[in-house]
Amino acid sequence: MGLEVERAEGVYLIGPDGRKTIDFISGICVNNLGHGVPEVVEAVQQQAAKSLHAMVYGEVIQSPQVQYAKALSDVLDDRLNQVYFVNSGAEAIEASLKVAKRFTGREEIVTCHNAYHGSTHGALSVSGNPESKKGYGPLLPKVRHIRFNSFEDLAHITAQTAAFVVEAIQGAGGVILPQPGYLQAARDRCTETGTLLIMDEIQTGFGRTGSLFAHQHFGVVPDVLVLAKALGGGMPIGAFITDRDIFSVIQKDPVLGHITTFGGHPVCCAAGLAAFQKLQQDRVLERIPRLEKVLREHLQHPAMVELRGIGMLYALQLNSYEEASQVRAEAQCRGLLTIGFLNIPDGLRMCPPLTITEKELIEGCNILKASMDTLQ
């Protein structure tokens, strides 16, 4: 991108020369409340003054970890009651795969074409873009990929399947929403076969889709919920959340079934908790339907093939990679930051902070339309 950022405030990234760029990607769904949130900054400063890393996660008690785990479990289904903090979304996926294999005693994993779950070895194995795997094989064995939104393909989840790993909404695949009833059908199939449903909400969590978590929007409760990105309020952290009975299998025989030195870092937990509380106390989610309506009304252009999304998570589909690249570059020159997708060449990702004003959102839409004008 070649964009140098010296500081960031609200929805703006600010360069050394003072030039402001509207951030339409929120660090890819990380900065859901925007930049420089006073409550988050204060929480970081206060916790840093108290303690940084004290011990490998879980060996001692540090209140930011406990408080944040409780805050998360309080708003989730009773079956999601055990929170384990790690360092990233990819590590949370890795740990979830271990839990599923150990709990079920099975080895097969089912996942989806076009999915993205991270770049570490196991996470890459269950991701669905063959191009990203070149040169890194052999990856995990017994991983089967099925078509997202294919009810028929759910039959490949069987009594030999340890876990079905699925995104609530395919992110890197171009913001592909589940068809009505698809996630419920997946839930039913997993229950029928004794398979764990691992739902990746790394991008969709914390209000991004208009509900606190996307699985709540679709009325489905997973066995394992994977979180990261906005979980830390701008600080690096991930987590997987499950039921105590499932989690207990990695606590013995052998003990310490998953170890993480920096997982649940107290400063990251303090920052994440402050952001999570502000998200709820400021009733940010109530703004999302109106913002979504404004976006759809003001982002219309003949060059667009499709505008696809929900809440404040959208894909702007164009005709080719060249068009998408030209529009992205032109928008950046005009003061708007957007980005493409890992798994599709001809789309632009839009996931601005949930705190963006209607005026700022319209300004961003106008920049995108002016950038698409250059295609004609």
Image (tube, helix red, strand yellow):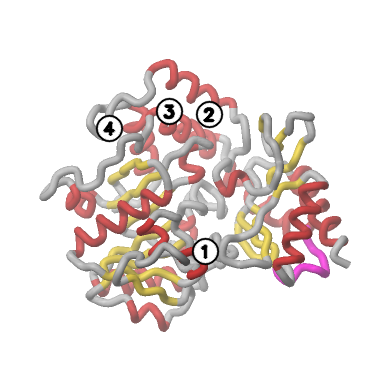
Asked if the residue under mark 4 is in contact with the one under mark 1, i.e. CB atoms within 8 Å, the reply is no
Instruction: In the rendered view, tell whether residue 228 sits above or below residue 190.
Output: above
Residue under circle 1? 170
- Tell which circle, 1 or 3, labels the residue nearer the N-terminal end: 1
For the residues labelled 1 and 4, the Cα–Cα distance comes to 33 Å
Task: Say which mark, if any, is on residue 267.
Answer: 3
Magenta-tinted stretch: 299-306
**What residue do we see at 30% from left, 69% from top?**
141
For the residues labelled 2 and 1, the Cα–Cα distance comes to 29 Å
**What residue do we see at 82% from left, 52% from top?**
366
Label 1 or label 4, whichever lies nearer to me, is 4
Instruction: In the rendered view, tell whether residue 226 sits above or below residue 145.
Output: above
In the image, is 215 to the left or to the right of 36? left
For the residues labelled 2 and 4, the Cα–Cα distance comes to 24 Å
Label 4 or label 3, whichever lies nearer to me, is 4
- Tell which circle, 2 or 4, labels the residue nearer the N-terminal end: 2
Residue 307 percent coordinates (x, y) = 69, 65
| Residue found at the far left of this picture | 253
Count the marks: how many? 4
Task: Say which mark, if any, is on residue 56.
Answer: 4
Instruction: In the rendered view, tell whether residue 155 sits above or below residue 239.
Output: below
- Amino acid type assigned to the residue bearing label 1 in the image: Gln
Asked if the residue under mark 3 is in contact with the one under mark 1, i.e. CB atoms within 8 Å, the reply is no
- Amino acid type assigned to the residue bearing label 3 in the image: Val
